[in-house]
Amino acid sequence: MSKVFEFKSNGKFTVTVDDHNVKIQPKGFSNFINKGGSKGEKSIPIKSITAIQFKEPRLTTGYVQFAYSGSSETKGGTMAAVKDENTITFVKKELKQAREMVDLIESKRQNESTPSKNTSVSAADEILKMKELLDVGILTQDEFNAKKKQLLGI
């Protein structure tokens, strides 16, 4: 299920967050000028996001910047962030929405990094592993036979 966030005040952005991606669609004249023309939609896989920088708006614009392997993170504050294609800018009245978006992405990052509990190994795979241990002398033939019966439910 995806959730769409519309930031309309400063730079105009539509951000769509689904279970696997963050899609950033810059819109408007200021984004066209600041980000070097129309770059189209950018899709960042959630599992590749290594950090999210969140700056609240004060005297200037706030922003959310995504860092991921292969991206170049700007370090020049708000002025540099405005030109970064991995950054969404917003104003004070959009702060609650920006926090909600970051919280959603962070929760999905946690889910992506949590190993699935359904990664069971089949009995055949286990028997093959046990056979390798038998072949190199770690298990005896009796130990192998007992484990094989256990795995096959015999």
Image: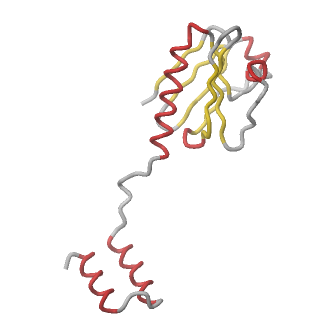
Above or below for 128 versus 66 = below
Q: Residue at x 37, y 74 (%)?
A: 126
Q: Can the viewer see residue 2?
A: yes
The image quadrant where one finds the C terminus is bottom left
In the image, what residue occupies the spot 45% across and 41% down? 111
- With respect to residue 16, does 134 lie above or below? below
Residue 122 position within the rendered picture, expressed as x and y whole percent measured from the top left: 34, 68
Q: Residue at x 63, y 8 (%)?
A: 9
Q: Residue at x 45, y 47 (%)?
A: 114
Q: Position of residue 89 (x, y in %)?
A: 66, 17
In screen coordinates, is 102 left or right of 51?
left
- The image shows residue 121 at horizontal and vertical percentages of 37, 66
- Place residue 21 in its image quadrant: top right
Q: How is the model colour-coded?
A: secondary structure
Residue 50: % across, % down: 62, 40
**Side of 133 where 26 appears, left or right:** right
Q: Is 63 drawn above or below residue 70 in the view shown?
A: above
Q: Where does the N terminus fall, quadrant-wise?
A: top left
- The residue most toward the front is 58
User: Relative to 92, is 117 on the left or the right?
Assistant: left
Q: Is residue 25 visible?
A: no
